[in-house]
Amino acid sequence: MPPALLALAISAFAIGTTEFVIVGLLNTIANDLGVSVPSAGLLVSGYALGVALGAPILTALTGRLPRRHLLLGLMALFTAANVVAALSGTYALLMTARILSALAHGVFFSVGSTIAAGLVAPEKRASAIATMFAGLTLATAIGVPAGTWVGQELGWRATFWIITALGVVSLIATAALLPRTLPRGEVTTLTQQARVLVHPRLLLVFAMTALGYGGTFVTFTYLGSVLETITGFSAGMVSVLLLVYGVAIAAGNVIGGKMADRDPVRALTTLFLAQALVLLAFTFTAPHPVLAVITLFLMGALAFANVPGLQVYVVQLAQRCTPGGVDVASALNIAAFNLGIAAGAFIGGLVVSSALGLAATPWIGALFVAGGLLLTLLSARLDRHAPAPAPQAAD
């Protein structure tokens, strides 16, 4: 794998840490800022919506910029936003900082995915994207539990100062390792962007992404609260269990990438089915510590394993259905990931606040993923019946 993928993975690690560390700090932030836990959970939804809105719009607007300069600018914005988060004294200012970070996040992953895919041979694209997203999965394995521990011991603002330092490291890595000869991004017209937005096959994949990926976040957003309240673990033990969860995510991401290299749709079908079953099982295992930990590991292994397949599949379809709009399609799929996160976190908050309570979040999440599975089966059927590409006319 090219060294440039390391720079992308380091940046993904920093971004992933700031996105998901909130999960382990919801109770701490809620108590410090005087808001409810479901309101603190909106810091997850707000971030995700910032990514969803920012990714397609800003990716299209920045298409003319050299990609190396674009990524450096994005990581500078990310770093500055985390300084604001660390200095936040109010819920509103912290939410503003989260949204600024999210704008950088959205463009980074949409452009970074196409850069990663372009650095390797076609048959290795899913693995290359998985390598970049390995930074995101390592963030859940190392960054989130470490950030949670720091936040619990030194205050949540200390966590954001550490993430700021990670942003500086990512800037240095990007400047040192990313090639200066990267091609400029696609410059898309409004007509091309609209074609991506309304193409039924691409809309189907975006829905697969939102449901299949987002279902996990109905539970994951409140996972710390579930483990403390229902399973009975201490706050310190929750940090350790988030480490277990993150290690499982890292392993699952690699496996998912290799599965998607062979056949992304078949990989997604298998992964979504397994993910729905494991989330359903967590409904019954959560009150039992040993069974809960086993199920937690399986949940982690499946949580991000579908990411390489979803991202490669949407690029493949965009190349076939909307040539010239591949970057925008990639950005819209990043938006779909985060719409799924936002919807999952929001619905999780509604469930927690309702009579159903925390214990219902796993099976509600399983319903989301089951919806993604049904859409994947439909997309596979449409692929089988798609007409063959027309032959090119001779020059």
Image: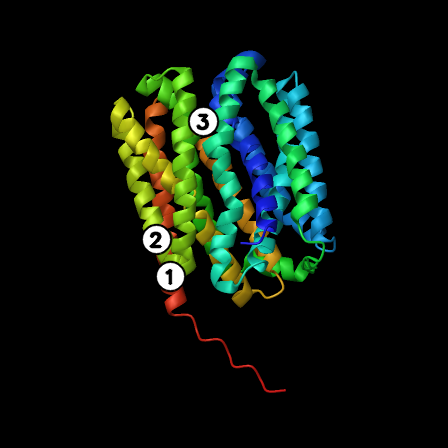
Q: Is residue 395 above or below residue 1?
A: below
The earlier-in-sequence mark between 3 and 2 is 2
Direction from residue 285 to residue 250 in the image, left or right: right
The answer to whether the residue labelled 3 contacts the one labelled 2, judged by CB atoms less than 8 Å apart, is no
Q: Residues within 10 Å of mark 1 (few under 14, many from 20)?
A: some
Residue occupying the point 64% across, 43% down? 54
Label 3 crowd bin: few (<14), some (14–19), many (20+), radius 10 Å: many
Q: Report which residue position mark 2 lands on.
A: 269
In 3D space, how far apart are the residues under numbered discs 3 and 2 (Cα atoms)? Answer: 28 Å
Label disc, if present, on residue 380 of the rendered structure:
1
Tag 2 and tag 1, C-beta contact below 8 Å: yes
Give the mark nearer the N terminus: 1 vs 3.
3
Q: Is residue 252 above or below residue 79?
A: below
* Residue 104 visible at all: yes
Could you say whether the residue bearing mark 2 is in a helix, strand or loop? helix
Residue 354 in view in this figure? no
